[in-house]
Amino acid sequence: MSSIQNCNKKEILQVDHLRIEYPTRKGVLVPVDDISFSVREGEILAIVGESGAGKSMSGMAIINLLEPPGEIARGNVVLNGRRIDNLPAQAMQKVRGGEIGVIFQDPLTSLNPLFTIGKQLVQTITTHTDLSAFKAKKRAVELLNEVGISGADSHFDSYPHEFSGGMRQRVVIALALCAGPKLIIADEPTTALDVSIQAQILSLLKTLCREHQTAIILITHDMGVVRKMADRVAVMYAGRIVEVGSVDAIIKDAKHPYTSGLMKCIPNIGSTVENLHHIAGSMPRLLEIPTGCAFHPRCSMMKERCRTERPELIPLEENHEAACLLFDKERTDA
């Protein structure tokens, strides 16, 4: 999907200057620090980065599922024109599952082992819609068929442990779609699956996105998944977005040194290399995030000012931004 097509779509979600804090005895941890992004209907936005970058925390903040004592310290989350980050717990519960569907990486943690698949689907549908139990059951069977579970009627009274990993993930996707949400947050949805099942699940998600015009926030560290799935990509490092742009711009013409390093770490089929590229060092701990640009201790292009000046996202081309002082022409010229 082109950026022009996306611009004509309705904006489903807007996250503005989101900051998450965890107060501890050693100080306040900031796993997500002043991030802003949006997603439109029918669009797949991938949020990528190493473990600890703040990807999953951002997704959990949107649906108000932060682990205590974590809290949104600043910023706001707007869904379909309505602010939701300050909603009471009961109102947020209706949004979560109703207006926003969620797919977690481990389907076993998303499904109750004590209830049948059918009962869980029917309960979710009746909670978030006005359908009767009879119509909810009919809808549940339709959903199971839609996500590729053949013989849905015969599986309706089965328990989660009776399904394979791929089948369980399909059920989780059906649960996420129960109330017809306009946004789905998929947090590493294929990590626990083998490669062939991964491809099926990703294809299913993309098809559902196109057919229902459902927006998807895909949280992942797998750039291969991003290449297949995403329309736009936001790259996170140490709690901040360091680059955002179309999937082609990020993969073929990455600007930020961190993003460029990630791209070089992906081996190309057919090419011969002695050693795979790697980014030196590791993601900083939350209490040890460097001043200035957080990536500067690992950056091969680091300048002295990178130690003290914190870069903001700078527009480079149409719908492409990077938070790097290399592109801050005004300050560089000065």
Image (cartoon, helix red, strand yellow):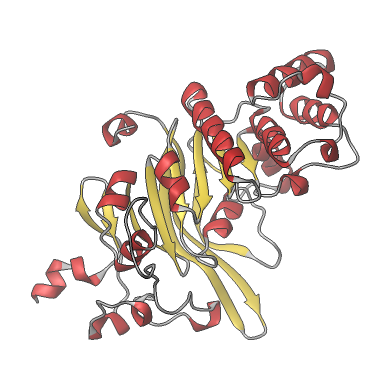
Residue farthest left in this picture: 333
Question: Looking at the picture, how far across and down is residue 220, in whole percent?
Answer: 52, 52
Residue at horizontal 54 percent and vertical 79 percent from the top: 285
Residue at horizontal 72 percent and vertical 44 percent from the top: 107
The quadrant in which the N terminus is found is top left
The quadrant in which the C terminus is found is bottom left
Question: Looking at the picture, how far across and down is residue 301, in whole percent?
Answer: 24, 76
Image-quadrant location for residue 323? bottom left
State whether residue 87 is above or below residue 327: above
Q: Is residue 330 left or right of residue 11?
A: left
Question: Looking at the picture, how far across and down is residue 329, in whole percent?
Answer: 13, 67
State whether residue 265 is above or below residue 222: below
Q: Is any part of residue 79 visible from this angle?
A: no
Residue at horizontal 21 percent and vertical 45 percent from the top: 318
Residue at horizontal 65 percent and vertical 24 percent from the top: 148
Q: Is residue 241 left or right of residue 55?
A: left
Question: Looking at the picture, how far across and down is residue 215, in whole percent?
Answer: 49, 35
